[in-house]
C-alpha cells in the first residue's frame, strides 16, 4: 500500500510556499492615495502630469486604482530628493501672480 498522505501534504506545502514567495500587488483607491501622500485631488493629478507620480490603472469602466508599492517608491524617492536639497520643498506647479483687477471696485 502506498502512503499518499505525506506526498499530498508535501505538494500542498510547496504550493503554499510558492504563493507566499511572490510579492503581493495591492491596489488602492483615490481616497487612500490622497491620504498617504497628503495631497489634494488637483495636486495629485498635477503631480501625475508633471512630476512622474504613478498613474492609475483603469480596471473597468471608470474604476481606477493605484499600485500601492509604486506610491511608496515615489514617496521614498521624493523624500530622498528633498533631503538632498537641504529640506527645501518644491512646488508641484507654478502659481500665477494675482492680477490687479478693477472689476467690482467702486471708483
Image (spheres, helix red, strand yellow):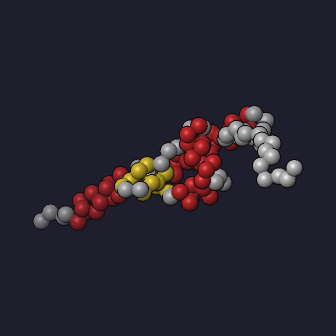
Whole-percent x and y of residue 16?
35, 58
Which residue does the image show at 55% across and 42% down from the upper left? 48
Is 78 situated above or below 14? above
Q: Nearer the viewer, residue 62 or 106?
A: 106
Q: Residue at x 15, y 63 (%)?
A: 2
Pick whichever, 68 or 58, lies toward us: 58
Residue 23 appears in the rendering: no
Place of residue 25 in the rendered image (x, y in percent of width and height, measured from the top left)? 44, 52
**Residue 74 x/y as whole percent:** 59, 43
Q: Residue at x 62, y 58 (%)?
A: 35
Nearest to the observer: residue 33 or residue 86: 33
Residue at the front extreme? 107
**Residue 6's quadrant in the figure?**
bottom left
Residue 16 can be seen, yes or no: yes
Expressed as whole percent of the image width and height from the top left, the position of residue 90 reads: 72, 39
Residue 79: quadrant of the picture: top right
Looking at the image, residue 65 sits to the left or right of residue 107; the answer is left
Q: Residue at x 63, y 43 (%)?
A: 76
Tell me: 62 left or right of 78: left
Pick the front one: 21 or 103: 103
- Locate the N terminus and report the quarter of the image it occupies: bottom left
Amino acid at each position: 500500500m502506498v502512503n499518499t498522505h505525506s506526498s499530498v501534504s508535501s505538494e500542498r506545502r510547496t504550493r503554499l510556499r510558492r504563493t507566499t514567495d511572490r510579492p503581493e500587488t495591492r491596489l488602492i483607491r483615490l481616497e487612500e492615495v490622497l491620504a498617504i501622500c497628503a495631497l489634494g485631488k488637483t495636486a495629485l493629478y498635477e503631480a501625475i502630469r508633471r512630476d512622474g507620480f504613478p498613474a492609475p490603472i483603469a480596471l473597468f469602466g471608470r474604476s481606477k486604482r493605484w499600485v500601492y508599492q509604486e506610491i511608496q517608491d515615489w514617496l521614498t524617492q521624493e523624500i530622498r530628493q528633498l533631503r538632498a536639497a537641504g529640506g527645501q520643498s518644491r512646488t508641484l506647479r507654478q502659481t500665477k501672480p494675482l492680477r490687479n483687477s478693477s472689476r467690482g471696485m467702486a471708483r
